[in-house]
Every structure is written in structure tokens, then in C-alpha cells.
């Protein structure tokens, strides 16, 4: 009896293994059949333009596993690029709910979901997600950047200020530049309320964050002018030249007014000559010609501008040259001809953009500290070349 059992034991084991394997095969086949049905149903809905139902079936069919997570992200990003934010949101929300995701995958899902909310204008929901991610190594700086964009859109400068510690810790120069402009916005509000001491503190903080912030020195010069500290205002204007040579032409007139009321008025024109020699600015050239005419002669001024225009011709420079010729002309006919030329050149200059964004190329006839197109700070500069500086 025992011998028979001993002989039957391998048979039983073999039968059990066969049945178990067959059961697994049947389960796999059932899963595959269900998967096929879901795919087929999803595709049918897709072909019949019922895209929301199609996505539900396709999400169920594409189970979240290590090798399919990227497929989910790719599908959601495709939806977002096409402007189908509601579908992108569904995919990312579906991913966030999955317990099988690793910590990096979960963070990625939260970050992408935050981007969806931001793109949809749901700033409060996006803010909550980005605040959670500010301390993560991978998404910390990116989340801080989105938070600053949210606060810039809502003009909530104080909330941006609350991120200062995290931004300084990030050592990201771009983020520090943006925050410096938040301080400039707060300083502008303080200036409107005649809180000059508070404004100076805010502007000093802006310069600590971004030492090349020409805007901070521009606003600081206004504070010094209001308190009749014109020497300090002049120093602020000079700093702007070293910070941002391209923007400097816009402050030359204000700088001259400050020098005229200071104790160092004789330093203005030598500095402007230095500005022209280094930058070739037409505004600096025209301003320096005033000094040449006053201190030397009109002939010397004409000679100077002709040499300058030969080296670097500009329409504004030509207009000023015509103006100089008009004042010297004794002949009525010649004077009228010069007037016509001057008016035509002026009309052309007036229809051309005065400023151009160095980041996105947006053109404008007026200056903005934040570009209306790309929203970058301090990137709108006077146009350079034949039609500009």
C-alpha cells in the first residue's frame, strides 16, 4: 500500500503543477481578454468622437506599473499641449491616486497636476501643490518659479516675499531677480504712500537679491530727489549705466536734471561723453552735442555728429543733424525743405517701436518693467541699430 502511494506521489505533484499552471494561464488569458475588450471599447468611443468615455476605458486598460507610468505622463502632456486641459487633469489625478507609484513618480504627478491647474487658471489649487513641492530636490526650484508666476499674475507681492528664504537657499539667480522686482513693486506702493524710509529699505533688499537691478536704483534715485539729496540721486543714475548699459538712455534726461540741482554739475557732460564712447547711444550723443555747442562752437558740434554718424548711422541722429542745419540756414527755401525732411523723419520715428524685449522680441512704444508678452522682468530695452539707439 505504501509502495503504491509512493509511486502515485510524483503523479499527484505533476498533476497539481499542471492544473496550477493551467489556472494561471486561464487567469492571464482572462485578463488579456478583459484588456482587449477595454482597448476595443476605448478605441470605438474614440472613433465615434466620445473622447471622455474613450479616455476612461483607455486609462483602465493601461494599468499603472513601472513600465507604463511614462506612457501615462506622455499621454497627459500631449493633452495639455493640445489645450485639452480637462483630459490632462484626469490623467494626472488618476496617477496621483495610484498607490504603486514611487516617491519620485508621485512628486512628478503632483508637479504635472500643478502645471495643469496653473494652465487652467486655477491658481489656488496650483499654489497648494507647488507649496508642497518646494522642499523637494527635483521640483523645488521649478515649483518656486511657478509660485512667483502665480503671485505676479495676482499682484500678491507680499506672498512672493514670504518665499525669500527658500529662494535664497536655492541660489537660483533667475528666482532672485524676480523676487527683487517684487520688492520694487512693494517699494512703488510705499512711494505712493510717502513712506520713503520703508521704500529705501525695500530697494536695498532688492539690490541685495539682484545687484544688477537697474530698476531698484532708478526708484532709489526718485526717493533721493524727493528728499533733495541730489548727489545721491546722481550716483544712483551712474550705477544704472554700469548695471544695464542698454537701458541707460532712458534715464539721461532725469540724470541731467538731478546733476543741475547738485553740487557736482560739472561732472555730467564728461560722464555722458564716456557713455557715448562706450555704448554708442544716440541719446548720449545728442546730449553731449549740447555741451560741444555751448563750450566750443556749432561747427565743432556738426563735425562731431558727422563723424559719429559715419561710424554708426541712426535715424534719430540724422534727424538731429537736420535740426542743426535748420537753425543755421538763412535761406527760406532751404529752411522749408529741411522742415519737410525733419517732419517726415519724425513721423517715421513715431510709428516705430521704441522698446524691444530682449527675451521674446515683443515691441512697444512705451516702457514696461514686466514684458506684457513673456512677463519677464527688466527685459524691455530701447531698440538699438538704425531705427533706435
Image: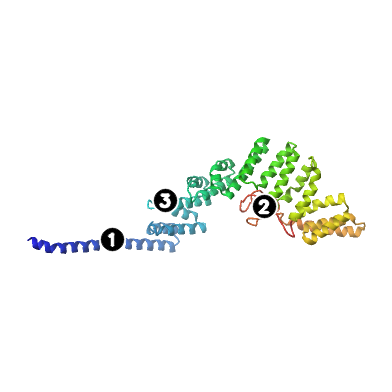
| Foreground pick, 287 / 52 | 287
Q: Quadrant of residue 193?
A: top right
Given this view, does label 2 or label 1 mark the residue nearer the observer? Answer: 2
Q: How many marks?
A: 3
Label 1 neighbourhood size at 10 Å, few (<14), some (14-19), many (20+)? Answer: few
Secondary structure beneath dot 2 equals: strand
In the image: residue 285, left or right of residue 166: right
Given this view, does label 1 or label 3 mark the residue nearer the observer? Answer: 3
CA gap, disc 2 and disc 1: 65 Å
- Furthest residue toward right: 330
Residue 220, given in percent of the width and then of the height, sits at 69, 41
CA gap, disc 1 and disc 3: 31 Å
Residue shown at 80% from the left, 53% from the top: 286
User: Which mark sits nearer the N-terminus, 1 or 3?
Assistant: 1
Q: Which mark is residue 380?
A: 2
Q: Quadrant of the C terminus?
A: bottom right
- Furthest residue toward left: 1
Q: Quadrant of residue 201?
A: top right
Secondary structure beneath dot 3 equals: helix
Secondary structure beneath dot 1 equals: helix
Residue shown at 18% from the left, 62% from the top: 13
| Foreground pick, 265 / 383 | 265
Instruction: Name the residue tied to disc 3.
Output: 103
Residue 121, given in percent of the width and then of the height, sits at 53, 49
Residue 295, given in percent of the width and then of the height, sits at 87, 49
In the image: residue 283, left or right of residue 359: right
Residue 284, given in percent of the width and then of the height, sits at 77, 52
User: Which mark sits nearer the N-terminus, 2 or 1?
Assistant: 1
In the image: residue 380, left or right of residue 258: left
Q: Are marks 2 and 1 in contact (CB under 8 Å)?
A: no
Q: Which mark is residue 27?
A: 1
Given this view, does label 2 or label 3 mark the residue nearer the observer? Answer: 3
Amino acid at each position: 500500500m505504501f509502495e503504491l502511494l509512493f509511486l502515485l506521489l510524483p503523479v499527484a505533484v505533476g498533476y497539481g503543477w499542471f492544473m496550477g499552471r493551467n489556472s494561471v494561464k486561464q487567469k492571464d488569458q482572462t485578463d488579456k481578454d478583459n484588456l482587449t475588450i477595454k482597448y476595443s471599447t476605448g478605441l470605438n468611443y474614440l472613433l465615434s468622437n466620445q473622447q471622455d468615455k474613450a479616455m476612461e476605458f483607455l486609462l483602465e486598460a493601461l494599468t499603472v506599473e513601472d513600465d507604463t507610468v511614462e506612457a501615462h505622463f506622455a499621454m497627459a502632456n500631449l493633452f495639455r499641449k493640445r489645450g485639452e486641459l480637462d483630459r490632462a487633469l484626469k490623467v494626472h489625478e488618476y496617477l496621483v491616486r495610484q498607490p504603486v507609484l514611487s516617491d519620485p513618480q508621485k512628486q512628478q504627478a503632483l508637479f504635472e497636476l500643478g502645471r495643469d491647474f496653473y494652465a487652467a487658471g486655477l491658481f489656488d489649487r496650483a499654489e497648494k501643490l507647488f507649496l508642497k513641492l518646494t522642499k523637494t530636490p527635483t521640483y523645488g526650484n521649478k515649483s518656486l518659479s511657478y509660485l512667483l508666476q502665480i503671485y505676479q499674475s495676482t499682484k500678491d507681492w507680499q506672498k512672493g516675499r514670504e518665499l525669500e528664504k527658500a529662494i535664497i537657499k536655492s541660489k537660483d539667480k533667475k528666482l532672485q531677480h524676480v523676487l527683487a522686482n517684487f520688492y520694487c513693486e512693494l517699494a512703488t506702493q510705499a512711494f505712493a504712500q510717502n513712506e520713503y524710509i520703508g521704500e529705501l529699505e525695500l530697494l536695498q533688499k532688492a539690490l541685495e537679491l539682484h545687484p544688477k537691478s537697474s530698476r531698484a536704483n532708478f526708484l532709489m534715485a526718485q526717493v533721493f530727489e524727493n528728499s533733495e539729496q541730489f548727489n545721491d540721486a546722481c550716483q544712483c543714475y551712474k550705477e544704472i549705466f554700469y548695471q544695464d548699459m542698454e537701458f541707460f538712455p532712458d534715464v539721461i534726461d532725469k540724470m541731467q536734471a538731478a546733476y543741475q540741482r547738485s553740487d557736482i554739475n560739472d561732472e555730467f557732460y564728461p560722464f555722458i561723453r564716456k557713455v557715448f564712447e562706450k555704448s554708442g547711444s544716440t541719446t548720449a550723443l545728442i546730449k553731449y552735442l549740447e555741451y560741444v555747442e555751448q563750450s566750443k562752437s556749432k561747427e565743432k558740434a556738426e563735425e562731431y555728429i558727422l563723424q559719429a554718424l559715419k561710424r554708426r548711422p541712426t535715424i534719430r541722429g540724422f534727424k538731429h543733424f537736420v535740426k542743426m542745419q535748420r537753425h543755421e540756414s538763412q535761406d527760406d527755401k532751404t529752411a522749408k525743405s529741411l522742415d519737410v525732411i525733419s517732419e517726415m523723419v519724425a513721423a517715421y520715428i513715431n510709428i516705430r517701436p521704441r522698446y524691444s524685449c530682449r527675451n521674446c522680441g515683443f515691441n512697444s512704444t512705451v516702457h514696461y518693467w514686466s514684458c506684457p508678452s513673456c512677463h519677464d522682468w527688466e527685459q524691455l530695452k530701447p531698440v538699438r541699430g538704425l531705427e533706435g539707439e
